[in-house]
Amino acid sequence: MITPTHYMLLSAALFMIGVIGVMVRRNIIIIFMSIELILNAVNINLVAFSNQLQNVIGQVFAIFVIAVAAAEAAVGLGIILAFYRNKETVNIDEMNLMRW
Amino acid sequence: MVDNLIIPLLKIVIVLNATLVAVTYMVLLERKVIAWAQSRLGPMRVGPYGILQPIADAVKLMIKEDITPTRADKWVFTAAPIIAMVPALIVYAVIPFGPEVSLFGRKITLYITDVNVGLLYVVSVTSVGVYGIILAGYASNSKYPLLASLRASAQLISYEVAVTLTLVSVILVAGSLSMVDIVRAQEHWHVWFAFIQPLAFGIFFIGGLAETNRAPFDLPEAEQELTGGFHTEYSGMRFALFFLAEYANMIVVSSVATTLFLGGWLRPFPNVAALGFLDPIPSWTWFLIKSFVFLYVFIWIRATLPRYRYDQLMRLGWKVLIPLAIANLVVTGIVKVVLAT
Amino acid sequence: MGQAIAFYTLAAFILGFAVLVVSTKDTVHSVLFLVLDFLFVAALYVLLAAPFLAVIQVLVYAGGIVVLYLFVVMLVNLKRAPEAHHDPHRRTKLGFWLAAAVLVELGAIAAYGPAASAPAVTQTAAMPVSGNTEQVGWLLYTSYLIPFEIASMLLLVAMIGAIVLAKREL
């Protein structure tokens, strides 16, 4: 019997994997992808509870999360491209100058 | 047990086999039709009138040497043709070939399943098919395929927007996302959606040409421009998979256009009783005839029209088709609201 | 029973691919594992009786956002790996242990907390449409119209911003 607790544990584990990705990896594109993992973990949680409470509002919120993730991915990747054109690196340890 | 497992499995087996056979014979059909358009005969040697040519082609491609470039990414190189082919085959799960028929005392529906988000499923699966092209160009580790694959995938994702917008206007008219419901809505309205939504039909057809990298939008795989495009480095069975994936995508676009715009399995003028002598023809035959008409028009256009340049192609997609699709959607919405009051 | 098998299989794949996303050295492989992860999350949504959200997940996430990531990865793919040298200021092991501790805490809260019995807030009786897509659409266009419009404004702004940021010269 799969209770929402199972889905919460799955969501928490996926969330932590995303957080580990953000903290440990230095390639900024992998960091962005870990942020997408975090957003997906939140979505899984929302949809699981929407299923349990029989209310579609959880899925509506998940759609908004997906829309925000799309916007954030587009702008973030634009920033990465602009930065890469100037400094030829995607290592966040080297992205440490506020101006040059 | 039988109804839930065996019958869908049988349907899947039949549909997949029919699709693969149809795809291999599409190769022959294309060569023949283009040959006739150019006042020559096409393949005539293998079998009577060249009927066995696809088998010869298949055997030739299978026994060819399988070359992988030295520093290509081996897993991605192998996976790319598979990723290009699988979405074209999965779409058949929701395409309705006909309504319910009684066979051996059971009522069997002539579609594998009827998902209530069927049309969105089709769109989402074809948008995953872009990966095959991107990865093919990347994994080849070579300049021309990479450029060609970036161009091809940019073309695909641009025309996806226009096609999805036209599908939204069809959904507005039909009132449902399910493919079977759309055909039944055409039955209910007694007219094919091609006549209610002619602009959407035209945009879907042009977008479908661009989505499948067919002429006149086949710059990414043109031999004259980009040395063979994204499948330059592929040989043997993997190239065959790309080749077949393109034809499978063509058949998918034809099937979806038939279902959405030409009434699916309905006979022409389903409400006119005077044409009742056409009733004994089974419904799936009408579906196949209409899809075949689309495929013939695809090949006809390839034989006739010159190729678009890349910037002309992108300009057409973004500056012409998308505004037209949005305008169509707005007008459809307004008409629907006005008609409801 | 079938649902349990489906859930455990999907959960194993989702977590496995997520670990692979975070730990692969090659960025392109990482992006491909992310696509697979999203496809399995979409399958999980189908299991949770949310078919509309499942196809939206495939269409937007797997078919749009990750294609964008793949393009950028191919455009910035460097010859040398960006993590060639080890940074002494980073304490990777401490990070892992802290994350494991937080995960155990979250698990304890989830398993033993009082969230197991929440009242069923039914709003579906008030909606005149039935069917998952129709209900989501009804909510989006009636009760939550303003967030919907704001989300579309957000996407427009993001589109303009991405174009301006990535242009070679303004």
Image (cartoon, rainbow, N blue to C red):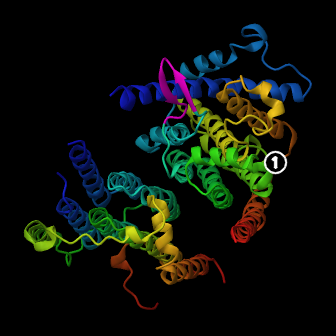
Q: x and y percent of residue C69 in the render?
A: 47, 63
B110 magenta-colored:
yes
Image quadrant where residue C6 sits? top left
C134 magenta-colored:
no
Label 1 CA crowd tier, 10 Å (few <14, some 14–19, many 20+): some
Name of the residue lying farthest toward the bottom: A99
Q: x and y percent of residue A41 in the render?
A: 30, 66
Mainly helix, strand or loop, the magenta region?
strand
Q: Is residue B156 left or right of residue B12?
A: right
Which residue type does callout 1 highlight? Arg
For this rendering, which residue is in front, B213 or C86? B213
Part of the protein shown in magenta: B100-112
- Does B339 sit above or below residue B294? below
> Can the viewer see residue B70?
no
Q: Is residue C161 left or right of residue C29?
A: right
For this rendering, which residue is in front, C150 or C36? C150
Q: x and y percent of residue B79 in the render?
A: 45, 40
**Secondary structure under the numbered disc 1 in the rendered image:** loop
For this rendering, which residue is in front, B334 or C98? B334
> Can the viewer see residue B22?
yes
- Does B140 sit above or below residue B23? below
Residue that carries the numbered disc 1 in the rendered image: B307
